[in-house]
Image (cartoon, helix red, strand yellow):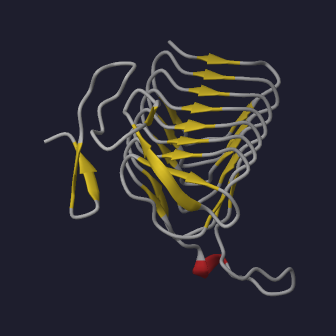
Amino acid sequence: MNYFIHESAYVDENVEIGGGSKIWHFAHILSNTVIGRNCVLGQNVVAGPSVKIGNNCKIQNNVSVYKGVELEDDVFCGPSMVFTNVINPRAFIEKKSEFRKTLLKNGCSIGANATIVCGVTIGRYALIGAGSVVTKDVPDYALITGVPGRQTGWVCECGEVLKGSDFKCVVCGKEYRLVDGILNTD
């Protein structure tokens, strides 16, 4: 075993945990969940059942990653952010067959207390501001803020907001270009 599981955490059967990962206090990993290498799942995180979490992901305290949600590599989920999995839930109607897939692509970050409504895709290296509510797909490198979430800018892979029209990061120097409303590094 080359990963860490705190003694207060619960890990169900049929779970895969990659080397170097850490599962902290009171977390619960449900069956058929796959957690990649070098991940950190904070206090009170629930993952699963049947969830896939990529390598190098950080899921902060009090986050539930439900069935239907997939995290690619290098995804950050801030404290107490929320995923949903049914668009119109009712306590008295079983709707598990209506779970919608939610995909978080490589390198994206979700701020504290943000809500990601099911059925959306968060693009590569996108940044969702704290407290934002995402109701539609988010492009790569987009900065989303507010309720409902709206694109208010672009961010670099290093996480810095890109300022000006030249799309050059003042922190790491990476350069981007905007073509047909899509930001890329080509």
**Along the horizontal axis of the image, is 116 left or right of 26?**
left
Quadrant of the rendered image containing residue 135: bottom right
In the rendered image, the quadrant that contains the C terminus is top left
- Give the image location of residue 5, x and y in percent: 67, 20
Quadrant of the rendered image containing residue 130: top right
Residue placed furthest toward the top: 2
Image vertical order of residue 12 relative to residue 67, above or below: above
Q: Identify which residue is drawn at 68% across, 55% down.
A: 132
Q: How many marks?
A: 0
Residue placed furthest toward the bottom: 93
- Give the image location of residue 25, x and y in percent: 80, 24
128 or 117: which is nearer to us? 128
Quadrant of the rendered image containing residue 118: bottom right
50 or 138: which is nearer to us? 138
- Give the image location of residue 160, x and y in percent: 46, 30
Image vertical order of residue 98 relative to residue 185, above or below: below
- Give the image location of residue 169, x and y in percent: 34, 28
**Along the horizontal axis of the image, is 128 left or right of 34?**
right
Residue placed furthest toward the front: 164
Task: Confirm whether residue 71 shows in the render.
Answer: no
Residue placed furthest toward the left: 186
22 or 63: which is nearer to us? 63
Q: Identify which residue is drawn at 38% across, 46% down.
A: 141
Task: Confirm whether residue 105 shows in the render.
Answer: yes
Image vertical order of residue 14 relative to residue 68, above or below: above
**Along the horizontal axis of the image, is 144 left or right of 156?**
right
Q: Identify which residue is drawn at 65% across, 76% down.
A: 96
Image vertical order of residue 152 relative to residue 75, above or below: below
